[in-house]
Amino acid sequence: MSGNRTFTMIKPDAVEKNYIGAILEKINAAGFKIVAMKYTRLSKADAGEFYAVHKERPFYSDLVDYMSDGPIVAAILEKDNAVADFRELIGATNPEEAAEGTIRKLYAESISANAVHGSDSDENAQIEGNFFFSQLERH
Ligand code: GDP
């Protein structure tokens, strides 16, 4: 059974370009409710921990540098089939391959600075949401 929550971040490149409002509008228009949201900044240690699954990938240190380079917006989103539907809304990792109308096609600049994060499973949605929000903040 698929869950009804996913986790997203608006990444430093999109925050820097003042795309927060436009991206949140797309998220709401696609039927997601924002149930927790925070404007914050990751330290290098935070970013390293968040992306620990990618530790062995060649781009890991670039990714950690980039994600700690400026503020981000973290949010928990609610909708039926949230994880899969949100992955569809954001589009492929590489914006050049992302479908027309997707958030990455519209707002991302490169495969690393790709505007938004979206959880890839219900389990990770929960882990990632817990990374940013306490129990209290999610209610
Ligand atoms: P996602 O689930 O679509 O975000 O993609 P992945 O889980 O594969 O990768 C996590 C994040 O690492 C991506 O969103 C990008 O910010 C970054 N990334 C992925 N592939 C590359 C790459 O080949 N080069 C660089 N520099 N960054 C990458």
Image: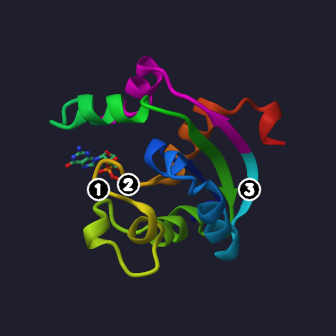
- Colouring style: rainbow
Q: Secondary structure at mark 3?
A: strand
Q: Which residue is mark 3?
A: 34
What residue is at 47 percent from the left and 23 percent from the top? 46
* Label 3: few (<14), some (14–19) or many (≥20) C-alpha neighbours in 10 Å: some
Q: Is residue 120 above or below residue 58?
A: below
Q: Which residue is mark 2?
A: 114
Q: Which residue is mark 1?
A: 110
What residue is at 62 percent from the left and 70 percent from the top? 26
- The residue at label 2 has a CB less than 8 Å from ligand 1: yes
Span colored in magenta: 37-53
- The residue at label 3 has a CB less than 8 Å from ligand 1: no
Contact between marks 2 and 3 (CB within 8 A): the answer is no
* Dot 3 amino acid type: Ile
Q: Nearer the viewer, residue 8 or 119?
A: 8
* Dot 2 amino acid type: Asn
Give me the C-alpha separation between circle 2 and circle 1.
Answer: 6 Å
Q: Secondary structure at mark 2?
A: loop
Q: Is residue 45 above or below residue 104?
A: above
Total labels drawn: 3
Q: Is residue 112 above or below residue 90?
A: above
Say which label, 1 or 3, has the lower sequence index: 3
* Label 2: few (<14), some (14–19) or many (≥20) C-alpha neighbours in 10 Å: many
Q: Is residue 110 above or below residue 130?
A: below
Q: Which mark is residue 70?
A: none
Q: What percent of the width, then of the height, locates residue 49? A: 42, 24
Say which label, 2 or 3, has the lower sequence index: 3
